[in-house]
Amino acid sequence: MLKMKVMRIQISTLLILLYTSIMSMAQQKPGYELNFKVNGLKDTTVYLGYYYAESTYVRDTARVNASGQFKFKKAQALPQGVYFLVLDKIRLFDLVVGNNQHFTLETSTDDYVKNMVVKNDDDNRLFFENLRFNMERGKEADPFIKILQDSTLKDENQKKAARESFGKVNDKVMAYQNELIQAHPKTMTARLLKSTKRIDIPEPPKRADGTIDSTFQLRYYREHFFDYFDLSDDALIRLPQPIYSQKVNEYLDKLFSPQADSIRKAIEPMIAKARKNQETYKYLVWTLVMKYQTPEFMGLDEIFVYLNDTYFASGEMNFWANDKLKKNLKDHADRLRKSLIGKTAPNLIMQDAALQPKELYKIKNKYTLVYFFDPDCGACKTETPKLVDFYAKNKAKFDVEVFAVSADTSMQKMKDYIKTMNMKWITVNGPRTYVGSYHDLYDAMTTPTLYILDEKKKIIGKKIPADRLENFLTNYERFQKQQQAGKSSP
């Protein structure tokens, strides 16, 4: 009898779970149906827009009736994220679209957020409650902010009290949002709030000998930087601020040295996380491609080559990248790969003003500056005199020679430019070449462009302004001496 009773309980439990599952599936209607009633609107057209990275797009259109009612409805579900209503190119208010895409929002034009009533959607209820809570806390904090921003106020005690009061208001906001995130973690609202949460970095622990590891906090921050930000959640691309790219840039720019090896090791785990979702995989890789196509720091164009070879030339991005895009990326990567820092510079053989061939590799100086210019280029007319000045003052000091390449086909323009600029170095005409187009050998699509080569013609610097050359070579030689001293020490 006991076994039979246990079996009945198990069957009953199974039936309850099955019924719950069926009911849950029934509630998850296909597609989306967003119903609105906005008092004060009538007989007009409104648009449903959405954010994507730094841009906004229109997703759907609806006609408002005489009672201010309208709906957006389609058979296919919307990608999750933050959306907004647009009327006559004016954004009315934001809303969230999460798992539930069948709900009703009612409000009025005199205050969309304050008067918002949400039906059948906890996500938007939480979203607008949070907005209203923040508005109230903003009013509460406003007098303290005014005190802190008052540059004429000299009373430090008053400023201290204002800072403390403002901190308490901020603590209320943080506590409210943390509670919301904990209670409703899967909602779009919680994911939005969580994505902006700050990482609390602990104080470094003391070692047994009482010393402190000075790298602890940096390592901790790197390890936990994405604790509250899911790189595989494509909804985080559709937020009012481009938080996704901002997080990526902050991570790479602030927590890692601008060196190719360091950056490559940093981005590989990021891409591995984003790879779980095709949309975030595509977005992150493309964000990195754009970032390192024309990098801020010298030498990081190597990352662009790495990204092209690993994710585009390999076919990894074939699910969205067409042949034309892949070819453009490959062409740029191939130009870069021949002229990366540390590579031996390709040889150049071109005619000088006397129509005599001049060869880059025959220059025997300790340093060679390969300078690409155009006689009609405005920026070149500013930069060339600076290079002339550097050359006159530092030719002997650094044992440097310049191999200047004119981009224009006209020999006469080149001769006039040499005379006008008082260029006393080697100048050749780029189109009159014996080794093919220099565009296929160097990343010099724009002028002026400058490369620095050592005595073995290895590229040690590129695209450095002429007025920073002396400082660059001084630091480079100091570093080389330090390296030699390190190797020779026991």
Image: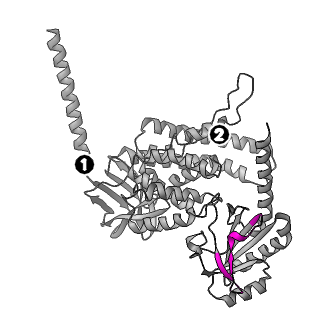
Looking at the image, residue 71 lies above or below residue 274: below
Q: Which residues are magenta?
A: 349-367
The image quarter containing residue 377 is: bottom right
Looking at the image, residue 223 lies above or below residue 375: above
Q: Nearer the viewer, residue 341 or 106?
A: 341
For label 2, the SS is: helix
Q: Which residue is mark 2?
A: 218
Q: What residue sits 86% from the left and 70% below the top? A: 393
Q: Which residue is mark 1?
A: 29
Marks 1/2 in contact by CB < 8 Å: the verdict is no
Nearer the observer: mark 1 or 2; the answer is: 2
Q: Is residue 41 magenta?
A: no
For label 1, the SS is: loop
Residue 409 x, y percent position in the rendering = 61, 86
* Apparent side of residue 371 relative to residue 155 in the rendered image (left or right): left
Mark 2 is on which residue type?
Leu
* Apparent side of residue 155 relative to residue 404 in the rendered image (left or right): right
Q: Residue furthest bottom?
A: 412
* Apparent side of residue 84 relative to residue 225 in the rendered image (left or right): left
Mark 1 is on which residue type?
Lys
On the rendered image, what quadrant is the C terminus found in?
A: top right
Report how far apart the C-alphas of labels 1 and 2 lie in the structure. Answer: 47 Å
Q: What residue sits 62% from the left and 59% below the top? A: 343
